[in-house]
Image (spheres, rainbow, N blue to C red):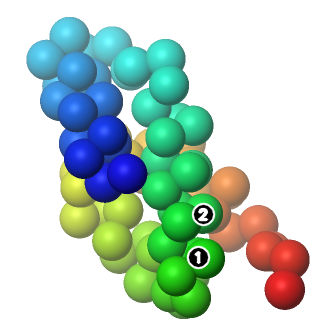
């Protein structure tokens, strides 16, 4: 899943246009990290490490409460 995010980020950086599925892929990756029982700060840190584009417009989604 991380590799898919990296590929879509590379597309975004190369073309200077956000890949149409980037947001969904990052959210899916975040969901996977949550399912692996990472905390919200750890998920944010992991995604932010991929680059600033990965967190663009996603902060609100990541901060939403997750079902237990």
* Residue 52 picture location, percent across and down: 29, 49
Report how far apart the C-alphas of labels 1 and 2 lie in the structure.
Answer: 5 Å
Residue at 50%, 25% in the rendered image: 21
Residue 49's place in the image compared with 50, above or below, is: below
Where the C terminus falls, by quadrant?
Answer: bottom right
Q: Secondary structure at mark 2?
A: helix
Q: What residue appears at the point 27 percent right and 23 percent down from the top-left corner? A: 12
Viewer-closest of 21 and 17 = 21
Q: Is residue 47 above or below residue 46?
A: above
Q: Which residue is mark 2?
A: 31
Image-quadrant location for residue 24 = top right
In this image, 67 relative to 26: left or right?
right
Q: Please tell me whether residue 3 is drawn above or below residue 68 in the rendered image.
A: above
- Visible residue check, residue 10: yes
Residue 58's label in the rendered image is none
- For the residue pair 15 and 8, the one nearer the viewer reads as 8
Location of residue 34 with respect to 14 vertically, above or below:
below
Relative image position of residue 11 (x, y in whole percent): 22, 21
**Residue 41: x percent and y percent?**
48, 84
Q: Are marks 1 and 2 in contact (CB under 8 Å)?
A: yes
- Of the numbered discs in the image, which one, if any, rests on residue 34? 1
Tell me if mark 2 has few (under 14), some (14-19) or many (20+) residues whose alpha carbon lies within 10 angstroms of its own. some
């Amino acid at each position: 899943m991380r590799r898919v995010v990296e590929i879509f980020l590379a597309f975004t950086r190369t073309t200077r246009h956000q890949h149409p599925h980037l947001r969904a892929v990052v959210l899916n990756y975040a969901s996977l990290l949550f399912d692996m029982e990472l905390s919200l700060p750890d998920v944010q840190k992991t995604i932010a490490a991929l680059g600033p584009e990965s967190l663009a417009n996603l902060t609100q989604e990541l901060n939403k409460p997750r079902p237990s």
